[in-house]
Image: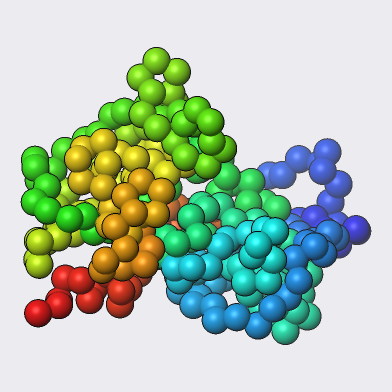
Amino acid sequence: MPESILVNGVHYYMRQQLVSGDSLSVRICETGCSRKIPPIQLPLDIVYEDEDLIVINKPSGMPIHPSLNHYTNSMANALAWYYQEQGKPFIFRCCNRLDRDTSGLTVVAKHLVSASILSNMVRRHQICREYLALVRGHVTPPQGTIDAPLARKPGTIIERTIDFEHGETAITHYRVMDEKNGHSLVSLRLETGRTHQIRIHMKYLGFPLIGDYLYNPDMENIKRQALHSHRLEFVHPITEEEMTFHAPLPADMQAILTAP
């Protein structure tokens, strides 16, 4: 489009060189659409939004993407509705995925440029992700680093396991934040982002997450794995501003700590 690249208000071709003091304007035009994601009106907790990205506090029980058994209750469905109400084209580009039953912060890019930059930041471990988890018992030592490679568990496409011979590098830093009612609230920071990394690493340490139907089916106090994406910190992909977001501990996890 002729108006896509403007220098000092005048159309420029990409081969022309800029000089110091020039004002560059780039118009990003979305031509595609995620047509296979039906727009559904669902609760959507938007923590932050600008023209480049959206930060969402996802509830537990909501998958990120539609699937065979969850075709109309995903975060993507909710965003498709949100875009439709604004009359904007919708292409779903989630940059840090969460398991269906993990609550908390996730980032969605609003256009191709921010998506590309954020994806590179994820690959380079430039997005700081901190989680809160509830485990049963007194965690010892109270802080440390778990360095144990992960691989797919033989015989299943879902579960993962520790595999020091064939697994991919996986590093998690943890620190106990609180202990009440026989449970420990643990803060965890990911250095890598493998599937089920926190769930497997805490089980490896001897303190699996309560409510984890795959790795510790203890549903007495909570009906999902007690894991919450609590904090995100990254440099804005376009403005390069330092961004930090927090999501409070959800009610089901808080209730375990405050129960009489």
Q: Is residue 24 visible?
A: no
Q: Which quadrant is home to the N terminus?
A: bottom right
213 to 258, vertically: above or below: above
The residue at the far right in this view is: 2
Quick check: 104 left or right of 34? left
Q: For this rendering, which residue is in front, 131 or 22?
A: 131
Identity of the residue drawn at 67% across and 51% down: 113
Quick check: 220 left or right of 79? left
**Residue 172 lies in quadrant:** top left
Q: Is residue 142 visible?
A: yes
**Residue 196 lies in quadrant:** top left
48 to 244, vertically: above or below: below
Q: For this rendering, which residue is in front, 249 or 156?
A: 156
Q: Which quadrant is home to the C terminus?
A: bottom left
Q: For this rendering, which residue is in front, 196 or 91?
A: 196
Identity of the residue drawn at 44% across and 68% down: 60
Q: For this rendering, which residue is in front, 128 or 241?
A: 128
Quick check: 16 left or right of 240? right
How many marks overall? 0
* Residue 142: percent from left, percent from top: 9, 46
Identity of the residue drawn at 13% across and 43% down: 143
121 to 211, vertically: above or below: above
* Residue 89: percent from left, percent from top: 78, 69
Q: Give the colouring mode of the picture.
A: rainbow
* Residue 43: percent from left, percent from top: 55, 81
* Residue 168: percent from left, percent from top: 44, 26
Identity of the residue drawn at 34% across and 54% down: 217
75 to 155, vertically: above or below: below
